[in-house]
Image (cartoon, coloured by chain):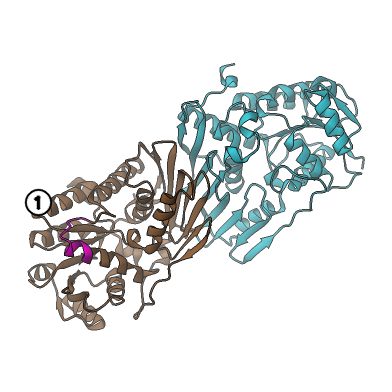
Chain colours: A cyan, B brown
Amino acid sequence: MAPTRWGFVSAGKICNDFKVALDTLPKDEHQVVAVAARSLESAQKFAKTHDIPRAYGSYAELAAQEDIDVVYIGNIHSQHAPVTTMMLQAGKPVLCEKPMSVNSREARQMIGLAKEKNLFIMEAVWSRYFPAYKKIRDIIDSGAVGEVKVVTACFGFKVGDVPRLRERLQSPSVIINYSNYCMSFAAMVFEGEEPQDITTSGHLSDGGDDQTVTVVLKYSGNRMATLLCCLSANMANEAYVYGTKAYLKIPNFWCPTEVIAPDGTHQFPLPPPEKPLNFVNSTGMRFEAMEVRRCLQEGLTESPLMTHAMSLQIAGILDQARTVVGVVSDQDKE
Amino acid sequence: MAPTRWGFVSAGKICNDFKVALDTLPKDEHQVVAVAARSLESAQKFAKTHDIPRAYGSYAELAAQEDIDVVYIGNIHSQHAPVTTMMLQAGKPVLCEKPMSVNSREARQMIGLAKEKNLFIMEAVWSRYFPAYKKIRDIIDSGAVGEVKVVTACFGFKVGDVPRLRERLQSPSVIINYSNYCMSFAAMVFEGEEPQDITTSGHLSDGGDDQTVTVVLKYSGNRMATLLCCLSANMANEAYVYGTKAYLKIPNFWCPTEVIAPDGTHQFPLPPPEKPLNFVNSTGMRFEAMEVRRCLQEGLTESPLMTHAMSLQIAGILDQARTVVGVVSDQDKE
C-alpha cells in the first residue's frame, strides 16, 4: 500500500503535535509532503523542524499540489470553513480540526460541498479513535455497568494557563472552544441519538464572551448528560458514565490513557513523542490519522465513528447553547 | 452545665444513627430521655436497644413532656411540618431532619412559628458542622484556590440499593429527597448569596416521579454551581470547588472525612460507632448535635451556619426545580 501523503494547513501548535503523532506511525504509511502557513517563514521553519520537503506561504499553493492525498486543517477555527472549502474545491480530502466550524451553517456547507465532490471529510475529534474509547464502548455494550442513565464531563483550562490562547482565539467563547469534547463524549456514549431537550446555563461577560457554561442534554428513557466547560479555572477534566449497575470514570476523557471500570483500571499507554508536544497526550492523534488512512484506502467519504451527522448534531447543540447565553460570532452575521 | 435532654420523634433508621452519634459525645452533655413513634412497640424496641428511659406510642405524648430541651424530628419528610408544628406549639425547640419540608411554604410556616414562639429551629444539614466544612471555608477564605468560579456536586444512590427507600418515600422525587445536600454545599461555598438564575433539567417518569435532575445556579461575577442528583444510579458523590488558582475535591461531600487541596489531603477521621449504623459516616451527626447544644445554651434561635434564610433559599430553589420538571406533592395542593 502506498503511503498516505499529508498536506498541512498551518504551522501552529496543534500542527506540531499532529506531526509528532504521525511520526509514531510507520514512515511507509504516513508522510507529510508539504506545509503551508500565512507566512512563508513560519512554514519554512516548521518544515525544517519536522523534515517536511516543501513549504508554502499561502494555502492556495498547497491546494494546487497534485501529490497530496489529504489536507490536515490545523489553523484557527474561524478559518476552518474558508480553507476547508478551498481544499475541497481543489479536490482534496480533509481532516479538519475541531470545532470544524464556528456554527452549524458553516459545518453544513463544508459537509455539503464534500458530499457534492464525493470527497472524504472528517472533524478531527481525535478522542473517538483512542483505544480507551473502544474499551468504554465495549464495557457499555457488555452490560457491565447496566443501563446507562447519566453521563457527566467537565473540561476546564484557565486561559491564562494556556500560552497565547486568549490572543489566539478570535472569540474566547468557552462554548465554541471547549464544548466539543464534552459533546462528542456524550454523543459517543449515547451513539449519536438526538437529545430530546437541551438546557443551557452560561454567563456572558461584559466583553461578550462566555467563560463558564453547563449544557444538559436529555435523552429518551430518563437518560441525561451534564456537561460543564470553563475558561476561567482548571477543572478535574474527568468524564463519568453512570449505569444502573456501576459506573466508569475516565480521567483526561478527551485523550484518555485509562478507563476505571468495575473490574479494575484498564491502561492504554501512548507512544512517547520524539519531539516536544504543546498539548496533553498528543501522540494519541495517531489513532485518528490511522482512521483517515483506512477511510481513504476503503473509499469512504466519512468515518463511521465520527460521522457527518454527529458533527452536525454537535454544531447544532453549540449553536443553541450560544443562542441561550448570547454569544455571537462574526460568522453568524454572514 | 446541665445535659441537653433530647426527645426523639421516630424510631427509624436515621434516629438510630443520630443516637449512635450522640453516644460518641459526653453523657453529661447529651442525653436522650424519650422516644416516640407511631407504634408504641417500635418506640419501646428502640428505647431498649438504645437505653432510653421512656417510650411513647404517639408524638403528642412526647410533646407533653416537661423535661425535654429539644426535639429531634427524624420521621418521614412529609410529616416534618405537622410534627414540628406540634412540638413548637408545645414550646419545644426543634432539630428537623432535611429536607425540613416538602415545599418552601411549609418551611416558611415552620420557621415563622418558631420565631413567633421565640424557639430554636434548625434544619439538620449535618454536613455544615463537619470539621472538613470548616477547613473548606478556611481554605477558600485564605485565597489558596483564588476566586471561586465553579462548584460542582453530584449525589446519586440507586433506590434499589437503599433498603426500603422506595417504600419509605411517599414521593420518590430525587429533587425532594436528594437535592438538599448539593444545594447546601453550594450555599456554603457562596455564603448564602441568592443565585441570579436557576436552570433545571430533569426527567419525569410515567409514575410522576423524577429520577435524575441537574440544577445549575448562576451567581454574580460569572460564578456557577452545577448540581446533579440521581435515584437510578450510584454516583461518584464528590464535590469540587474550582477557583482561578486551584481546586478542592471533597469525596463524600455530604459527610466528608477528607478535603483534597493544593497543599495536600486534609484528614478528619470520625469516631467509630458503638452500634451498627444505617448510613455512611453517621457518627458525624455529633457535630450538629454539639451546635444545637451551643445554640440552646447561648439562647440562639437559629444557627449562624445553617440559617433560616439558607433553609428557605434552598426550599425555594427546590420548589422552582420541581415546577420545571413537573413534580407535584400532595402538600403543594393544600
Image height of B14 relative to A247, above or below: below
Residue drawn at (21%, 80%) of the image? B47
Q: Left or right? Give the position of A23 relative to B320.
A: right
Residue at the extreme top of the image, as rendered? A334
Tell me the magenta residue range: B293-302
Residue at the extreme front of the image, as rendered? B142
Residue A334 appears in the rendering: yes
Residue drawn at (72%, 29%) of the image? A75
- In front here: B284 or A89? B284
- Kind of residue indicated by mark 1: Glu
The percent position of residue A58, horizontal first and vertical second, equals: 81, 21
Residue A191 appears in the rendering: no
Residue drawn at (43%, 51%) of the image? B142
Which residue position is annotated with label 1?
B116
Image height of B270 relative to B124, above or below: below
- In front here: A18 or B149? B149
Q: Left or right? Give the position of A120 relative to A237.
A: right
As for residue B250 lying within the magenta part, the answer is: no
Query: Alpha-carbon neighbours of circle 1 within 10 Å: few (<14), some, or many (≥20)?
Result: few
The percent position of residue B252, horizontal first and vertical second, equals: 44, 62
The percent position of residue A220, horizontal first and vertical second, equals: 49, 45
| Count of numbered marks | 1
Image height of B44 relative to A131, above or below: below
Quadrant hosting residue A123: top right
Q: Secondary structure at mark 1?
A: helix
The N terminus of chain A, quarter of image: top right
Q: Left or right? Give the position of A101 relative to B233.
A: right
Q: Left or right? Give the position of A202 relative to B291.
A: right
Please, which chain is the residue tagged with disc 1 on? B
